[in-house]
Each structure stands twice: as C-alpha cells, then as structure tokens.
Amino acid sequence: MTLAENLFESLGDRTRRSIFERLAVEGELTVHALTAKAGVSQPAVSKHLGILKGAGLVRARRDGRETHYSAQPQALGPLVDWIGFYGSFWREKFDRLDELLSRMDQ
Amino acid sequence: MTLAENLFESLGDRTRRSIFERLAVEGELTVHALTAKAGVSQPAVSKHLGILKGAGLVRARRDGRETHYSAQPQALGPLVDWIGFYGSFWREKFDRLDELLSRMDQ
DNA sequence: CGAATTCATAACTAGCAGGTTATGAAAAGA
DNA sequence: TCTTTTCATAACCTGCTAGTTATGAATTCG
C-alpha cells in the first residue's frame, strides 16, 4: 500500500477525520480530552489513534499516565502529490501561482 | 456531509480510487472497458461509478448502448481546501513557491 | 426479426471495520 | 497503602459496504 493509499483509508473514516481535525486545530490533546467529545468510547478513540499513527498523521508523547497526541500535517504530503498527479496538475499549479503573485504584490 | 467529506468517503475505497485513476490517466472510458481490468464484476463497477458520480468526480456521457465516463479533476477542489486548512497552509504554499521558482529559472 | 452486446438495477450474501464491554498495567493522589 | 485515573489491549458483536448473481431495457449487428 502506497503512502497516499494509506492516507485515503485512514481519513476515509468520519471519526478519524474528526479526531485529526481537532488535533490540527486545538493542538496537542490527551486521549481523555479527545474521548470527551468524540462521541465514541475511549477504546474506540485509542484504536483510531493507532491507525492515524500508523499513517504518520499523529504523534504520541507519553507523559506519566497520559498520552498526548498531536497532528503531523506534513504527513499529508503524499495526498497533495496524489492530487497533483491524478487531479489537475496544471490547474493547481496556476491557481497557486495566481495566489502567490497577488500576495507578493501586497 | 460536506463536499470534502464526500470526497474522502468516495476515494476511501481502493477499487473506486483505481477506477478514478484510470479515468484520469487514460481519459474517457466505457463501463465495458473499465470492467475488463477492474477485477470486479460489471455491476460492481457500475455501482462504484454511481458513487463517484455522486461526488462529482466523474461525468457520464451516454452514446447508444454505451456509457462513457470521464474524470472530473476539478471536483477535487474541496479536498485541496481541506488539506490547506487542516494540513499545512504555509508549508504547502512555500513548497509550491520553491518549485515554481526553480521552474522559472530554467 | 432474432441474437448479441452494453449497462443499470434489484436482491441477496458475506466479511470486515468500527463499535462495544471487560480487563489490567502504570501512574498519581489521598 | 489503597483508591482513582488514564490508557491500551483483548475479545466479542453487529451493521454496513462491497461484492455476487439474476434480470431486463435499450441498442446494435447479422
């Protein structure tokens, strides 16, 4: 399984997406904190975190009895590459270029 | 369900990804042609195409008894937006900039 | 017309992914 | 020390999803 495939399967699940999004927005969170708003049980959260970790999307930091998880956005790289390849190589490029040029004007 | 969510769920399946990738690379193809190399039955292919169509990822063109499907890469836009938002807004931008600058040097 | 091709849909099946509860280890408090 | 908290893992359950076969409509070919 390629890296991009792994990312698609990991983020293909609604609960995992939601967990990743929270970590991306709120920063480092414990399993306990994640579980509180996840809508599923703690073991379910742990299992999802394991899968996200397997895809490199999150990182675990153990501190005493707590495990702090944080998003690793650079792991999305292969997804960007996939989109660039199958999606719309040129269009994206020019969209970015337009955006960058308008920013550089300011 | 948001557009990005719809895309993640559609492309979360290996067979659908493979179908979309073929259409993106090879251009317009009939259900028959897709089925020949899909590894699953024709009804399965039709079902997947229906889901991809629902997400806007493919377009159908009926011609006699054949239905020609083609990839609609611009439908990946919301996925790009999602990555930009949750992923790594700045890093991606600068990666693109680096790439663009090196291209402009040539 | 009669046969063959193409495709979509219906109806059904099975495997697995995502959920649960139970449990125990490790750490922190009282 | 005894209790509580936090987390991971094991074991199990279940519903959904991706697969199948069957079928028929529409089209094309001979």
Image (spheres, coloured by chain):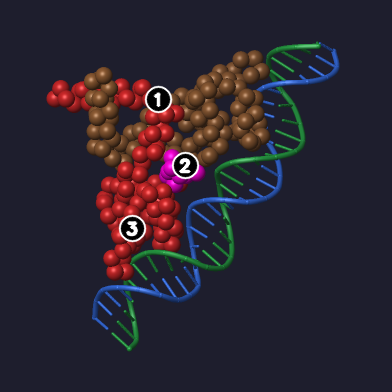
Chain colours: A brown, B red, C green, D blue
The alpha-carbon separation of the residues under discs 2 and 3 comes to: 23 Å
Looking at the image, the residue that sits furthest to the front is: A106
Amino acid at circle 2: Thr
Mark 3 and mark 1 lie on one chain; the one further toward the N terminus is 3
Amino acid at circle 3: Ala
Contact check, label 2 and label 3, Cβ < 8 Å = no
Mark 2 and mark 1 lie on one chain; the one further toward the N terminus is 2
x 43%, y 62%: residue = B43
x 43%, y 40%: residue = B4
Q: Main secondary structure of the magenta part?
A: helix
**Neighbours of disc 3 within 10 Å: few (<14), some (14-19), many (20+):** some
Determine the image quadrant of residue B11.
Answer: top left
Query: What is the x, y in percent for residue C29?
Result: 75, 12
Viewed as shown, does residue C11 lie left or right of B92? right
Where disc 3 sits, the SS reads strand
**Neighbours of disc 2 within 10 Å: few (<14), some (14-19), many (20+):** few
Residue occupied by mark 2: B2
Relative to B100, say whether A39 is above or below: below
Where disc 2 sits, the SS reads loop
Q: Which mark is residue B60?
A: 3
Chain of the residue displaying label 2: B
x 42%, y 56%: residue = B50
The alpha-carbon separation of the residues under discs 3 and 1 comes to: 34 Å
Total tally of numbered discs in the picture: 3
Where disc 1 sits, the SS reads helix
Residue occupied by mark 1: B88
Is residue B35 shown in magenta? Answer: no
Query: What is the x, y in percent for residue A26?
Result: 53, 23
Determine the image quadrant of residue B39.
Answer: bottom left
| Camera-nearest label, 2 or 1 | 2
Mark 2 and mark 3 lie on one chain; the one further toward the N terminus is 2
Segment colored magenta: B1-12
